[in-house]
Image (spheres, helix red, strand yellow):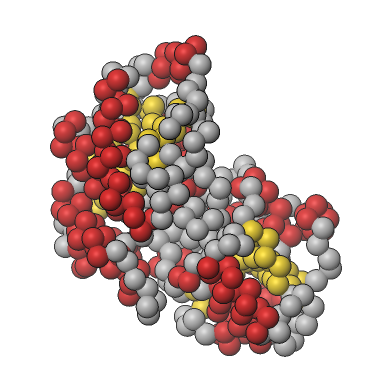
Amino acid sequence: MGRASLPLSCNAILEKRTLLLKRIAFISVHGCPMAVLGTRSAGGMNVYIRALAQGLGRQGFAVDIFTRCHGSDEPLVNPLDANTRVIHIDAGPEDAPKEDLFNYCPAFLQGVNAFAGSNGLHYELLHSHYWLSGWVGQALSQEWRVPHVATFHTLAEIKTRARVGEAEATSRSATERQVVGAVDRVIVSTGHERLALQQLYDAPEDKVRVVFGGVDLDLFHPGDQRAARDRLGLNGHQTILYVGRLDPIKGVDVLMHTLSQIETCRDVQLLVVGGNTDDAESRRLRTLTGQLGLAGKVEFLGSQPHETLPDYYQAADVCVVPSYYESFGLVALEAMACGTPVVASRVAGLQAIVKDNRSGYLVAWHCPDAYADRLEVLLSNDALRHSMGKQARQAAVDMSWDRTAQGVAAVYAELGVRPQKG
């Protein structure tokens, strides 16, 4: 498979800049930080990996993100900035479904080893993301004799309990358990996830660290709602926003039923940002829209460039996150950073971000009536909505990616890996 490489001079410059820095290898088998967000397998984890890597770069590390190749025309090495880069590894068909990727982990492992060996690279620490990467990271850790830190982002045992009918690969839970037992540290986003690791995976208490995720406060900030709506070509209707992948565990069908029950605010539209028209879940939700008589009230916008998302958050009256499970509610935090109140499900990853009755509302049941009640309160009360939006922004400013990177760097320091001084 042919793929372009960076000019030698460009590679040489990057190598010279990072020569004296401590190198960290991020392993992210299926979560490429350069993938189009909002599609079937690209969401908050992709943003997290890129933002954390760049934050660690600002801390004084050199970070290489190893991920699967997902396009034959993409370069082997993709610099993100002076200290961070993405390295694509050939491992199985580019369009292989996520369910099959475990079969290609040995090939991915071999590819990472080959790249490191041919470029004479030494890494001080491995940080794996998701269970597939945990398997690869543990094998590399043993071979390279360096510490291994894992962030799972989602866990099979929690996910299958969160929603009836949710299924995961039979190898996933066993692999997660194996990785938890072998790694040096596990980083989680919430205390709930730490407790779940201890109860469901027998994780030693002294091995798990809580480091909250972050948000790009320069990109996501309050703005003029009318101007944002003009940029997006929206009408004067009150606007409910959903942003994210279209997946059953995201609960978008609950939001559809909710919209059909809102009565006190009749001029309401729902914008759905994320997904592709050929996704099975997208087709199911479009069919449901027709069945519920919501034609003209719901607009499926598909995946949008990350840099345009602030316009949607600023244009919206409220953002809804009805997920059955979130390890870290990035969408809720992005909306809050833009001064938009959030109505979210009362699940662990969202409870840690949205403060009930302050920056929005938390809904305890996946019941359209409960969501409709909270939405009607917000949509019918401008003063309350604006007050909650201000409190949402105030809460978000304490959750920058630099703060997250500092927390992760502190975990690395426990393992004897610190950024280069000076």
Viewer-side residue, 291 vs 16: 291
Which residue shows up at 62% across the image and 62% down it? 277
Q: Is residue 414 left or right of residue 302?
A: left
On screen, 99 above or below 249?
Answer: above
Q: Position of residue 299 (x, y in %)?
A: 71, 67
Q: Position of residue 412 (x, y in %)?
A: 28, 37
Q: Position of residue 238 (x, y in %)?
A: 76, 71
Quarter of the image where one finds residue 389: bottom right
Looking at the image, the residue that sits furthest to the front is 1
The quadrant the N terminus occupies is top left
Q: Is residue 179 left or right of residue 151?
A: left
Camera sees residue 56: no
Q: Position of residue 336 (x, y in %)?
A: 60, 59
Viewer-side residue, 175 vs 90: 90
The quadrant the C terminus occupies is top left
Viewer-side residue, 93 vs 387: 93
Which residue shows up at 47% across the image and 29% down it? 3
On screen, 379 above or below 369?
Answer: above
